[in-house]
Image (cartoon, rainbow, N blue to C red):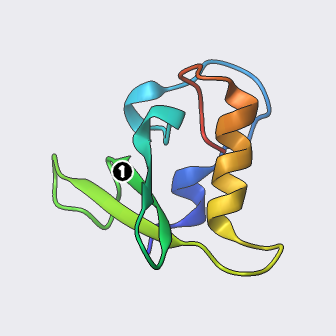
Amino acid sequence: MACLAELTYNESSGPLRKTVSLLTTDVKLIYKERENLAKLTICGAKTADPGQRQIIYLKELPHMLCPVLTVKRRLAKAKGIKTSLF
């Protein structure tokens, strides 16, 4: 599991470090017959081998705290712009 500090920021504004950030373009929504997933690809994760990317799959859950719905809302708010996911 990724550290929350790797996915969020301390400042609400300022320059975006795209090489070490989780971006909206690093998300792929996967729709399967029995489940929907969000695939997050994290560059430079501390738990990954050097130069490798860490993949995290979020599973859709049937309640209001669903992580996939949160990601979908953020992607909709970004309107296709390459920006930070969180």
Q: Report the front residue among 30 and 39.
A: 30
Q: Quadrant of residue 5?
A: bottom right
Instruction: Point out the residue furthest to the front here.
Output: 33
Question: What's the amino acid at mark 1?
Answer: Thr
| Left or right: 36, with 75 as reference point | left
Residue drawn at x 31%, y 67% is 47
| Left or right: 33, with 65 as reference point | left
Q: Is residue 80 above or below residue 59?
A: above
| Left or right: 69, with 26 as reference point | right
How far across and down, in percent of the image, does residue 49 sit? 16, 60
How far across and down, in percent of the image, does residue 85 sit? 61, 41
Q: Is residue 72 above or below residue 64?
A: above
How far across and down, in percent of the image, does residue 27 sit? 46, 45
Residue drawn at x 24%, y 62% is 48
Q: How many marks?
A: 1
Q: Report the front residue among 74 and 37.
A: 37
Disc 1 packing (10 Å; few <14; some 14–19; many ≥20): some
- Quadrant of the image for the C terminus? top right
Residue occupied by mark 1: 41
How far across and down, in percent of the image, does residue 6 sit? 51, 54
Q: Report the front residue among 60 and 12.
A: 60
Question: Dot 1: what SS?
Answer: strand
Residue drawn at x 16%, y 46% is 51
- Quadrant of the image for the N terminus? bottom left
Residue drawn at x 37%, y 30% is 19
